[in-house]
Amino acid sequence: MTNKTSIHGSWASRWIFILAATGSAVGLGNIWKFPYITGENGGGAFVLVYLACILLVGIPIMMAEVFIGRRARKNPIDAMSDLATESDSPKAWGLVGTMAMISGLLILSFYSVVGGWVLHYLKIMLSGDMIGATSAQAGTAFDNLLADPAMLLAWHTLFCAMTVSVVAIGINKGIETATRIMMPALFVLLLVLLGYAITTDGFAQGWDFMFKFDFDKLTWGAALIALGHSFFTLSLGMAIIMAYGSYMTKDASIGKTVLTIGILDTLVALVAGLAIFPIIFSNGMDPAAGPGLMFISLPVAFGQMPFGQLFGVLFFVLVGVAAWTSAISLLEPSVAFLVERFGLKRPTAAIGIGVGIWALGIACLASFNLTSDVTFFGKNTFDFLDYITANIMLPLGGILTALFAGWVVKAKFSQDELQLPSVLFKAWSISVKFTAPVAVAVVLYFLLNPIK
């Protein structure tokens, strides 16, 4: 198996893989969620706990997903099935890959709806409609968007089409080309926005909010939040990293590559916080606004600041790029599966799955208006899909992947792929066998049974 190559080709270099995987990891959550939970849970103290969780849980599981994909050179379902067979274990382990791919598709269905919101707000910033707007007016504008199924459908359709078009072209001409353009653009936009934030009156307050060591806020609950976010931020349990790993060249170091991705993902989240919260504090707004921060508070802030329209446009371009790269990665594993298993042409596979995602997305966007009274366990369609993927499917997939890599795959296979010194390999092995499964199981338990 070690001499196999993917029928889809391979990344041109290790750095392209790093950028592609970082593009997958950097999404809407990095832009507002991570900075906020950092500030609310002890600032610098929380960052240290988060980094420890990344190293002890996130990185080891990500290394496992990459080596599984690279060794098999196949889509996640067949990769796990084939590697299980080679390790004298049941092919049924491929069901873990199936669950991961389904998770990714479910996430993409509602993620595309939110991606549509971002495109809508980019249009609003370009038009200047938010200049001088009050918070009440911005809130009404967002409510009106959610209440308009035709508008939501138009933007959702456009975002789906953007995503499908890149994946349909292929690994090198499609995803790789998009990555070469979008990820450097994302980094540049972040730095430009950071430079702008530094000039605001709220920069010192934003810095303190995120980095002041407040050990009083560093509770067990905060540690649990850090552990949960460290797992989800690296796109684990969604089949993405296995699929991307199958296109990774044999000579690239998995350990160094994955560590670099973890560092870049964290840096982007921290810089995003330093770019956003000074603007929020400068305008006396609430940093705990959640999704409303992006679609209500920030548009108002940009509308009231010098050169605010320009930087508001740049911000939503940044968020749009982050959402787009993540959506592309969510679609790729399933497209790879259809191409490999059934021999479909890549454009046919991408369009076919894209239509299914588009249709499920319609159910999600309708849950804000036409079908708002339809609920599943007290949640509308959008919130229900978000809940079962984030709180059940992804943690369960992470546990099973770690157990598969640590207990099922023969050690000589993982050693051959990881090429780690003996001490580091033992540390990785302990993590995927014991530390990571237990830690993720704890997160899963408390997600389903929140601390009162």
Image (cartoon, rainbow, N blue to C red):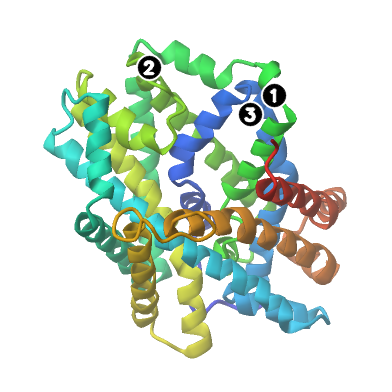
Q: Which mark is residue 154?
A: none
Q: Are marks 2 and 1 in contact (CB under 8 Å)?
A: no
Which residue is label 1 attached to?
A: 218
Which residue is label 2 attached to?
A: 198
- Secondary structure under badge 3? helix
Indicate which label's residue lies in the foreground, 3 or 2.
3
Furthest residue toward bottom: 342
> Could you tell me which residue is drawn at 79 percent across and 63 percent down?
403
Q: Mark 3 vs mark 1: which is more N-terminal?
A: 3
Q: How far is the residue under mark 3 from the one under mark 1? A: 10 Å
Q: Is residue 209 left or right of residue 354?
A: right
Q: Which quadrant of the view contains residue 260?
A: top right
- Secondary structure under badge 1? loop
Kind of residue indicated by mark 3:
Val
Indicate which label's residue lies in the foreground, 2 or 1.
1
Q: Which quadrant of the view contains residue 380?
A: bottom left
- Secondary structure under badge 2? helix
> Could you tell me which residue is drawn at 27 percent across and 42 percent down?
143
Which residue is label 3 attached to?
A: 47
Q: Are marks 3 and 2 in contact (CB under 8 Å)?
A: no
